[in-house]
Image: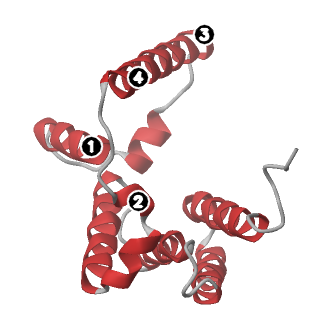
């Protein structure tokens, strides 16, 4: 029986895991660490040129660049990263082949049920966690929720979730 981590896919999986880990570290490291993380994402992206995993590295490099430019870390900065990524993908058609997630898929009843189930379980888990732990989130709100009118925050959240 073949392993899910066969030799052919292992480098791609390690690359993807590395980019995701680096993106997760960006908001919590000091500026000097952000520079090192951005450099690592650019180097990993350059090494993956002409490979199917390049679009993920490109996304990570754009993400790091936006954070590196001191654009506040929020839903709006994520929207900017996504727009910049889509612009680059649109400018270079050969990159679209590696963006399998960007292809039109099937949206049948199974997908709808899985989405609704995931949303329900995630929401309930988050509510249960909040009620059980009663965390102090004032510092998180100050750090991650931009000072904007409520309607702007709602629209930003909906666009980000979409």
Disc 3, SS: helix
Task: Give the quarter of the image for residue 151.
Answer: top left
**Residue at image x 57%, y 72%?**
53
**Residue at image x 57%, y 63%?**
23
How packed is label 2: few (under 14 Cα within 10 Å), some, or many (20 or more)?
some
How packed is label 4: few (under 14 Cα within 10 Å), some, or many (20 or more)?
few
Circle 4/circle 3 CB separation < 8 Å: no
- Give the Cα separation between the discs numbered 4 and 2: 24 Å
Q: Position of residue 51 (x, y in %)?
A: 58, 80
Q: Is residue 128 left or right of residue 110?
A: right
Q: Nearer the viewer, mark 2 or mark 1?
A: 1
N-terminal-most mark, 3 or 1: 3
In which quadrant is the C terminus drawn?
Answer: top left
The correct choice, above or below, for 37 with respect to 4 in the image is below
Q: Is residue 95 left or right of residue 83?
A: right
Q: Which residue is mark 2?
A: 73
Q: What sort of colour scheme is used for the picture?
A: secondary structure
Q: Is residue 50 left or right of residue 17?
A: left
Q: Which residue is mark 3?
A: 132
Q: How many marks?
A: 4
Q: Position of residue 160 (x, y in %)?
A: 29, 47
Disc 4, SS: helix
The correct choice, above or below, for 119 with respect to 104 in the image is above
Q: Nearer the viewer, mark 4 or mark 2?
A: 4
Q: Which residue is mark 4?
A: 119
- Give the Cα separation between the discs numbered 4 and 1: 13 Å
The correct choice, above or below, for 129 with respect to 99 in the image is above
Q: Position of residue 136 (x, y in %)?
A: 54, 27
């Amino acid at each position: 029986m073949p392993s899910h981590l066969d030799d052919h896919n292992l480098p791609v999986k390690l690359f993807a895991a590395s980019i995701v880990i680096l993106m997760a570290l960006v908001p919590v490291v000091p500026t000097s660490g952000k520079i090192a993380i951005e450099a690592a994402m650019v180097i990993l992206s350059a090494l993956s040129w002409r490979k199917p995993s390049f679009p993920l590295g490109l996304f990570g490099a754009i993400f790091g660049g936006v954070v590196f430019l001191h654009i506040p870390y929020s839903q709006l900065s994520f929207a900017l990263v996504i727009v910049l990524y889509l612009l680059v993908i649109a400018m270079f058609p050969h990159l679209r082949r590696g963006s399998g997630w960007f292809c039109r898929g099937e949206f049948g009843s199974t997908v709808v049920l899985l989405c609704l189930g995931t949303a329900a379980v995630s929401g309930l888990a988050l509510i249960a966690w909040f009620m059980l732990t009663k965390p102090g989130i004032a510092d998180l709100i100050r750090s991650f929720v931009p000072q904007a009118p409520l309607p702007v925050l709602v629209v930003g959240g909906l666009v980000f979730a979409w």
